[in-house]
Image: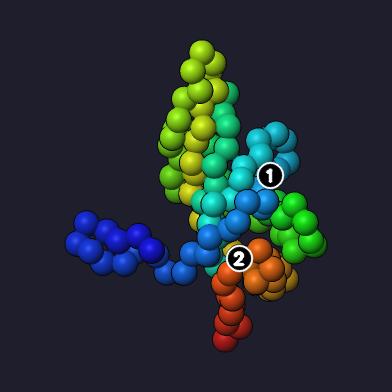
Amino acid sequence: MTKGKEGVERRKHKRFEVPIGAFVAFRPRDTRLGEIIDISAGGLAFRYLATKEPLNGSCKLKIFPTEGDSYLNDVLFKTITDFGTYEIPFTSITMRRSGVQFGELTYNQMSQLQRFIHSNTDGDLRIQEKRL
């Protein structure tokens, strides 16, 4: 988990490393595809190849593994970080890393996220039911 300048934990949710083989796709029109690095109940980090401007703003994404059926559709998110990690020589292509925060998830999306984390990481995420 990430600590701030004073050494105080800033993240609310535990992150789980995602082995190779899980991706994010941006909706509805963006054709970028990213490989998930880690995921939590509050967001995820991924890497992607970019030939145009970095991600910014909010939109929807689809989260899916290469195998299995534990996926999430139409997840609202907000980009928190996006930076270049490597420039491919003699091209305009850059490897970038992005961190996003999920918007409000429906109960169904929370259940799907729990199943995705359980099926695609070494972690077990237990999402608490909201109480009124």
The amino acid type found where label 2 is placed reads Thr
Q: Quadrant of residue 27?
A: top right
Using the image, determine if residue 115 lies above or below residue 36. Answer: below
Give the Cα separation between the discs numbered 2 and 1. Answer: 19 Å
**Image position, residue 81 (x, y; %):** 43, 45
Using the image, determine if residue 24 lies above or below residue 32. Answer: below
Residue at disc 2, secondary structure: loop
Residue at x 63%, y 51% (from the top left corner) = 20
Check disc 1: other Cα within 10 Å, few if <14, some if 14-19, many if 20+.
Answer: some
Question: Which mark identifies residue 121?
Answer: 2
**Image position, residue 107 (x, y; %):** 68, 73
Going by the image, does 71 lie left or right of 5? right
**Image position, residue 86 (x, y; %):** 45, 30
Q: Residue furthest left?
A: 6
Is residue 131 visible in the rendered image? The answer is yes
Question: Which mark identifies residue 25?
Answer: 1
Check disc 2: other Cα within 10 Å, few if <14, some if 14-19, many if 20+.
Answer: some
The amino acid type found where label 1 is placed reads Ala
| Disc number lying in front (2 or 1) | 2
Residue at x 55%, y 47% (from the top left corner) = 46
Is residue 110 visible in the rendered image? The answer is no
Using the image, determine if residue 43 lies above or below residue 99. Answer: below
Going by the image, does 66 lie left or right of 83? right
